[in-house]
Amino acid sequence: MSMFKKVLVSDDLDCINQGVVSLLQSLDIDNISQVSYCDDAFLQIEKGILDHTPFDLLITDLSFKADHRKQKYPSGGILISALKEKHPQLKIIAYSVEDKLQKVRRLMLDHNLNAYVCKGRHGLNQLGEAVQEVYKGNNYLSPQVQNALNKKLSVEISDYDIEVLHLLATGRSQKEISDHLLNNNFAPSSLSSIEKKISKLCDHFKATNSIHLVAIVKDLGLI
Amino acid sequence: MKNLPLSFLLFWGLCLWGSTSALFAQISHDSLHKYYNSIVKPNGSTDISKGIRFYSQKKEIDLKRKDTLSTIQDLRLIAMGQFKIGNLYDSENAVVEAITLLDSYPKNDTVIEGRKGLYNQLGNIYREAKNYDKAIETYNLSLHLSKKQSDSITIINNKANIYKDLGQYQKAAQQLQLAYGKIANDTNSLQFAMILDNLGYVQSKLGDPHALPNLRKALQIRETQDYLPGIYSSNKSLAVYYFDRNDKKQALDFANKAYEAANSFNSITYLHDVLSLFATMDEDPKIIQFKQITDSIAKEKQLAENKNAFIKYNVANEKKKTANALLDNEKEKNQKLIFLVLGIIIFLTSIYLYFTLRIRHNREKILQIHHTESRISKKVHDEVANDVYHLMAKIQGNTTDSEELLDDLEKIYNKTRDISKENSAIEIQEHFSEQLNDLLLSYQSEKVTIATRNISKIEWKDISEIKKTTIYRILQELMTNMKKHSEASVAVLAFQQNNKKINIEYTDNGKGCCLKNKNGLQNVENRIQAINGTITFDSEPGKGFRSKIIL
């Protein structure tokens, strides 16, 4: 099984570095370097390229504690954007406690980050998966932040939804709802789209059938 | 009660004072009439000087009483008397003093009337003093103020007299024709006779054939009215008329009639006037020469005596202006000082207020910080330290395997993460609704759906930053609360915007709670109150949780 050959780990907490290093070793990666400052990480990567032994992968934390050393790259985010601009081929995995979706989205979309792994109980396992996925050329997101790239998950109840729920609550069949919507110039009004809509609403509201759905939305005061 | 005798005395004093002044006024009123006549219609040679003395004393009294109008009236009578006895200088002084007083008096009809009379008097004085330009000037001032026709006729006549004196008969005739035109409807009055006489005299000098009829008509009117000074003037004019035409007999005839008239009202001025007419008409060249010399000496003397009180008045006027300017200057200075003082007071007050408010603000800020610190510390203690302690106890008891330990540790880890998240700074971004969506998404899971209504319809750009931050925090805490305690499968957040107000209704289908134990949401309430919003909770065990937020 082939794997990354040369990996750089950047984290200001040694114990975490240790955990990551032992994980990488378990993945048969031998050439592992560790740094505690983003500036060092940048220099190491530059050096590797100059020495014709470039790093294949950077695993970096996002937040670094500021100390006496003045840093050109005070955070992992800045380091990532600088490196990705200069060396787009370099794979980078962010490994952070941060789980704000917007941050994840920005790094993934704006800076082409390869993977985002949240530190936590299962962080190391997820990091292992991430390394393998990235090696395969895929992106990876920890389950906590998977929603970052999936906007459709947000459930916005539209006026159309409310109208359908109202009609449903009056005891109309799906066919009758379709007819009613058609007569009142509500689109879409086809039977299939109504069927789909109701099933989606059942899904959202964890309802087993339309009666259950109406009961739930009534309880919630939506209709 | 002690004050009673004193005030009683004072009352009597006032009554006494009042009665004496009333008495004085009564006496004054009687003598006023007598002395007024002694100046206006003098009978004896000493009448005028007696009148002048009386009015000089009265003037001093009126001045002290600050009765300006009476003082001016006094001065006017003094001026009239002095003029009549030939004291032009004193007369002028009196008029000028009166005009000065009038200047300081508020303008009204009475004042204008008085001013007109004074200017006329002054014009007469200048005429007598042979300062003709000045006389015309002052007559014009008087004419300018005249409203009554009879007044303006008198003044126009006076102007004509000046031109007559100057030998400018054409101009004099013009003025008199003007007056004649104005008076046309009252052809029997003495005023008309005066104009006619003067006009006739001037026409005679100009060789106008209307001269004689006019002179005769004037004499006729005056004789009908038996007005002696008028009869005197008419006769004199006719004498001059015939003298000019070398009709000595007629001339002497009229001159004698004038002499009679002058004698009958016993006036030295008139007598002097008529006698010098005789001198002019005399055949003896020595007498004619004497007359000419006397006239030129008198003229020289008069000119020398032109210590011009009017100029003095102008000087006094200048002085007054300077004094006023100084006064204004002083006032301006005072005003500036007041503004300066006000400005300083406002400045100092604002500095004081600024610092007081700043200190208060700082104190509130510090209080807020302390409050937040103690809240976080309590949270760390209640949620983290307790759990860690339990964990330590468990490990000491050696009853747990490592997997269970890890689970416990993860719980503690997540709790610290939550505390950190709740208190970390949030950057409000351009797409706030997306940011809110992300927040809600991070709480969404297999077990719980978080649905929203109209979140994208809110105009977030109209909402202040602090409000957005508060909304973010509140929703975060509501969600945390929901996740921790409610066991709900669906939570709905309905948004609504009324101008700048945002209404948010939160509903879930969880197990609800007893509202008495809403400790977890105390913080939400604090946040909302801090920005003057309102929040209401509604929940019962088993019936979900509702909350309505307006901010």
Image (tube, rainbow, N blue to C red):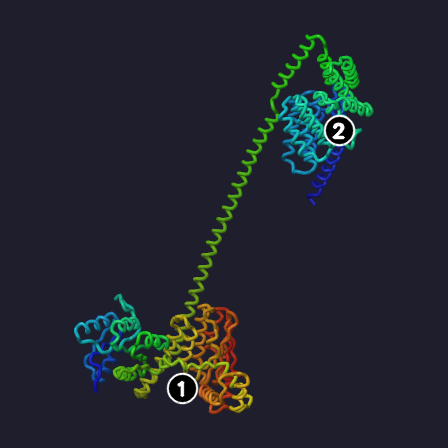
Question: Identity of the amino acid at label 1?
Answer: Glu
Circles 1 and 2 in contact, beta carbons < 8 Å? no
Q: Could you say whether the residue bearing mark 1 is in a helix, strand or loop?
A: loop
Residue B42 position in % (x across, y down) = 76, 22
Residue B405 position in % (x across, y down) = 32, 85
Q: Earlier in the sequence, mark 1 or mark 2?
A: 2
Instruction: Please indicate whether residue B536 sits to the left or right of residue B8 in the image.
Output: left
**Residue at image mark 1:** B446
Judge the density around disc 2: few (<14), some (14-19), many (≥20) Cα neighbours within 10 Å: some
Residue B100 position in % (x across, y down) = 63, 31
Residue at mark 1 to residue at mark 2: CA–CA distance: 120 Å
Q: Chain of mark 2?
A: B
Of the 4 image quadrants, the one containing the N terminus of chain B is: top right
Residues indicated by labels 1 and 2 sit on the same polypeptide chain: yes
Q: Could you say whether the residue bearing mark 2 is in a helix, strand or loop?
A: helix
Instruction: Please indicate whether residue B53 sits to the left or right of residue B549 in the image.
Output: right
- The quadrant in which residue B166 appears is top right
